[in-house]
């Protein structure tokens, strides 16, 4: 597997575009399309929030009941959540217009929305945006980049990625784009994320892969502890690479699984590192836990701790906050038989061992906490299981951004 140039439209047969439709923002792209020249099998995972946006309900139905999907239409600025029956009618109209222009069934059109909850979509602008997207869609790399920028809200950078791998001599490609900066919490799945591939794979196999991989990638990130109403992750596969169908239990399956995991983990870390107002990505790795579940609980508890996040922002080596977060995680461990390390790009420092802090240098520890990627390693010495979670520091700007989000 290798990382290649491009994004969501890197695989064969996929096109993309991003355009300005004036949904909420001025002078910026705010609608995107992902389109496949051939029908795709589709797998998806969605928010566990009981309050689900209309496009989430629409996509859940498509993923569950439609024989295939062929296009995704995304708007930013307005979430189309908390909009009742009118919200579902907006999805129906969006699919109707897109289907007519693209020449595909309405039930082959997936929909994504992100932005302010409770606001109404301006359907006249949505319809004009779809027309622009249909005209602009392209296989060009720049078109994929435009699409990744068009789905941004408070993100500071667009997030796109593409990889290729050889499967029995056939080149298979995966592309991705995602957005998310606030309302990010590990509860499947706190963002909008899209993955495309030209691999030939069944819906059942793809669904199983995605749902298992999400547990160790997108469900292990948090920015602010808030699970969105619009969380959606979709994977579309059109089979145009021409490979033999990927089947579970084969070496090809493991190779594709590794590539999908790399895509999902990389994009998830990018979301965590680009949290609203954030200066640093925080990683917490727990090793030698008794169970995988407990390792996850411990790692998540640290990256979700507001006090720990604030300490990283202040470059304050206050290990007591990490110890405290581990202690209320719900996982059993012995604080008198564990180790905590701070890690940077070129150094690792033992901070806590067997019930007490070590004789470490506050100055050197503060330097480690000043890096763009801050890592905590926790060894609980109970077994052989491990887990990693990602978050970001908590800054003044997070409050500023969310205090006037609707303004």
Image (spheres, rainbow, N blue to C red):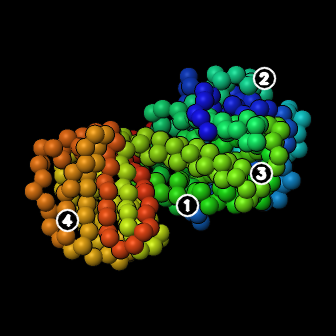
The residue tagged 4 is 353
Of mark 3 and mark 1, the one earlier in the sequence is 1
Number of labels in the image equals 4
The residue tagged 2 is 135
Inspect this view and state whether residue 97 appears: no
Residue sitting at x 37%, y 44% = 281
Number of the front mark, 1 or 2: 1
Q: Sort mark 1 into few (<14), some (14-19) or many (20+) by Cα contacts within 10 Å.
A: some
Q: Are marks 2 and 3 in contact (CB under 8 Å)?
A: no
Classify 211 as above or below 234. below
| Residue 28: image location, x then y, percent | 56, 25
Q: Nearer the viewer, residue 263 or 51?
A: 263
Number of the front mark, 2 or 3: 3
Q: Nearer the viewer, residue 41 or 54?
A: 41
Classify 72 as above or below 383. above
The residue tagged 3 is 246
Image quadrant where residue 27 sits: top right
Disc 4 to disc 2, C-alpha distance: 62 Å
The image's mark for residue 269 is none
Of mark 2 and mark 3, the one earlier in the sequence is 2
């Amino acid at each position: 597997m290798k990382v290649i140039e491009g994004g969501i439209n890197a695989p064969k047969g996929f096109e993309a575009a991003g355009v300005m439709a004036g949904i909420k923002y001025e002078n910026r792209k705010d609608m995107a399309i992902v389109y496949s020249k051939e029908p795709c099998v589709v797998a998806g995972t969605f928010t566990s929030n009981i309050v689900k946006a209309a496009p989430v309900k629409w996509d859940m139905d498509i993923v569950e009941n439609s024989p295939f999907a062929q296009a995704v239409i995304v708007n930013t600025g307005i979430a189309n959540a908390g909009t009742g029956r009118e919200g579902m009618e907006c999805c129906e109209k969006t699919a109707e217009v897109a289907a007519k222009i693209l020449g595909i069934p309405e039930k082959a059109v997936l929909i994504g929305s992100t932005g302010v909850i409770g606001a109404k979509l301006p359907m006249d602008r949505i319809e004009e945006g779809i027309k622009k997207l249909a005209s602009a869609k392209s296989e060009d790399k720049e078109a994929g980049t435009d699409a990744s920028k068009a789905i941004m809200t408070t993100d500071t950078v667009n997030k796109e990625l593409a990889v290729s791998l050889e499967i029995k001599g056939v080149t298979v490609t995966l592309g991705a784009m995602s957005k998310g900066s606030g309302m990010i919490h590990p509860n499947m799945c706190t963002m909008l994320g899209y993955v495309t591939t030209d691999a030939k794979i069944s819906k059942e196999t793809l669904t199983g892969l995605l749902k298992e991989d999400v547990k160790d990638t997108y469900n292990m990130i948090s920015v602010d502890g808030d699970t969105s109403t619009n969380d959606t992750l979709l994977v579309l596969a059109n089979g145009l690479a021409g490979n033999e169908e990927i089947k579970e239990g084969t070496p090809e399956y493991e190779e594709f699984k590794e590539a999908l995991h790399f895509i999902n983990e990389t994009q998830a870390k990018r979301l965590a590192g680009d949290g609203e107002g954030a200066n640093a990505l925080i990683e917490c790795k727990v090793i030698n836990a008794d169970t995988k579940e407990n390792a996850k609980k411990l790692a998540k508890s640290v990256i979700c701790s507001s006090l720990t996040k604030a300490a990283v922002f202040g470059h304050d080596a206050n290990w007591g906050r990490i110890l405290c977060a581990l202690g209320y995680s719900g996982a059993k461990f012995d604080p008198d038989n564990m180790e905590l390390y701070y890690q940077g790009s070129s150094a690792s420092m033992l901070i806590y061992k067997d019930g007490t802090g070590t004789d470490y240098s506050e100055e050197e520890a503060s330097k480690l906490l000043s890096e763009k990627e801050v890592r905590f390693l926790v060894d609980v010495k109970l077994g052989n299981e491990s887990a990693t979670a990602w978050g970001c520091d908590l800054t003044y700007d997070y409050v500023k951004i969310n205090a006037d989000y609707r303004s």
